[in-house]
Each structure stands twice: as structure tokens, then as C-alpha cells.
Image: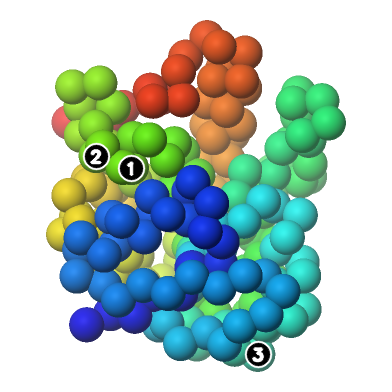
Amino acid sequence: MTKVTIFGSGNMGTAIASVLTAGGASVEHIGSEGGTITGDIVVLAVPYPALEAIVASHGDQLAGKIVVDITNPLDFSTFDSLVVADGTSAAAGLAAALPSSHVLKAFNTNFAATLGTTKIGELETTVLIAGDDETAKQNLASLVTAGGVEAIDAGSLKRAHELEAVGFLQLTLAASEKISWTGGFGVVR
């Protein structure tokens, strides 16, 4: 059985846990202020600004782990831009800070409600996964699909830049009530 540690127990952390548990994983939640990581896969279901503190406090424990960054690095004061440099991503910054980890970008283009119901309208919810380690991506994709949600390999970690842009667009549309928090972007194959 795959063990997963999730930083955060808010809406996204809880929704991701439900998918991964349905996929056969053993899931534990810990807070960013402390806790021992026991999972082989670690999901950072926290706001972007919390990443730095998690790296500082748990960086050694994350070595050799699959680390899943779900953040969207929005400027939450204005909701009009991302706070990472053009052409880069929060996930790329995380990978640079954790060179011994297998960093993936996933779940940032999903809303908690669509993970919980496994549907976006009539479509299956799809998790887009970007990363440079093929085995890590496959391990996460296998858990996600076993949990009743589709998964698509979105390419290398460079694609996190585009995934964060899609996440940003989707969040701003929902915040301005142009789409609902139970909606979002779906994938038709």
C-alpha cells in the first residue's frame, strides 16, 4: 500500500485525500508547523507562501520522496497576476530548493468539489501531472485513476508554468463568479 502524507487538511487536502484513499493509498495529514513525514508521496496542499517554510522545516525529510506541488502562486491581494517570474513556476522553484526530491505539479487546475464528485459537469475530472521523473508521474497517475479520477501526463516540469497559468485563470473566473467552484475546465478525449 502506498503511503501519502498531505500537508494541509483544508478543502483541497481533504478532496485529494479522498481520491487517493479511494485509490488504495494510506493517507495522513500533517500541518506545516510540524509533523513527521511517513509517506512516499507528499502532497503540499497549502497556499504558495507556505512552501518556503515547509522546505525550511522538512527539506531533509523530503529527500527521495515524490513531492506534489498543488499551489497556484497568485497575488492574492489583487488577484490579477502570478507572483513568480515570467517563464518559471512555483514548482520549478520548489524543485530547485529540493534537488533530492521528485517534484511534480498536479491538482492545481482542479477545484476541491470536482475532485470530490469526480465530475466536471458530465465530464470526468482530470488531473494534469507535470514532472521530470516518469516513474513518479506514473505512481501518482496510478493512484489518481484507481481513485476514480482521470490523469494525463502533461509533460516535463517545464509545463508547470502553463498549468499554473490555467489554474490562475480558473481561480480568477470562479472568484469573479463567471464559473462556479463546482465547475472548471474539463478534458474531452
Residue 60 circle label? 3
Point out the image quarter for the N terminus: bottom left
Residue 74 location (% of width, % of height): 71, 37
Circle 1 residue: 115
N-terminal of the pair, mark 1 or mark 3, is 3
Question: Badge 3: how crowded within 10 Å, few (<14), some, or many (20+)?
Answer: few
Q: Nearer the viewer, mark 1 or mark 3?
A: 1
Q: CA distance from mark 1 to mark 3?
A: 30 Å
Q: Which residue position holds label 2? A: 118
Mark 2 or 3, which is nearer the eye? 2
Q: Position of residue 123 (x, y in %)?
A: 20, 27
Cα distance in 3D space between marks 2 and 1: 5 Å
Is residue 135 depicted above or below 113 in this figure?
below
Place of residue 118 in the rendered image (x, y in percent of width and height, measured from the top left): 24, 39
Looking at the image, is 91 positioned above or below residue 125? below
Q: Residue at x 52, y 26 (%)?
A: 170
Mark 2 or mark 3: which comes first in sequence? 3
- Mark 3: amino acid: Asp
Q: Position of residue 60 (x, y in %)?
A: 65, 90
Tag 1–tag 3 contact (CB < 8 Å): no
- Left or right, 138 with respect to 83, comes to left
